[in-house]
Amino acid sequence: MKLIQNEHIPIPAGHYTPVVEHNGTLYISGQLPKTETGIPEGIEAQAQLVLAKLDHLLTHSGSDRNHVLQVRIYVPDVAYWDAVNKEYTTFFGAHRPARCIVPSRELHHGCLIELEAVACVI
């Protein structure tokens, strides 16, 4: 098991590692749509931000969006499903990883989405 940490991957505030590699598989910790300046308004902007964060982590861990195997998305209300699906489809294009969207309760910091993923190293 290798904990991926480099100058391009932010050090988390919590007790976790953003990316762990094991046997050529990357496990990406949950990404919230939070930056140093705050949380964007609206599910579309928040979905775009977590997908951009995923893309960044993949790039700096030896993979890319076309090698994502599975994605788990958490939203506080199933009403966000269509908007999340639209942003997700735009991001992945023809690539279709295994996925689930889980309507949960409130997310940390009042966020509307959290995303975690599994990918293979290329």
Image: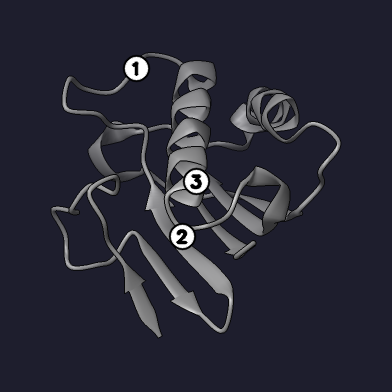
Report x, y in % for residue 72.
59, 55
Q: Which mark is residue 40?
A: 1
Q: For numbered disc 2, what is the local secondary structure?
A: strand
Q: For numbered disc 1, what is the local secondary structure?
A: loop
The residue pinned by badge 3 equals 59
Quadrant position of residue 107: top left
Viewer-nearest of discs 3 and 2: 3
Residue beneath the point at 21% across and 22% down: 38
Mark 3 or 1, nearer chain start: 1
Residue beneath the point at 44% across and 25% down: 46
Q: Are marks 3 and 2 in contact (CB under 8 Å)?
A: no
Residue beneath the point at 52% across and 57% down: 62
Q: Residues within 10 Å of mark 3 (few under 14, many from 20)?
A: some
Specify the amino acid type for callout 1.
Pro
Mark 3 or 2, nearer chain start: 2
Report x, y in % for residue 67.
70, 55
The residue pinned by badge 2 equals 28
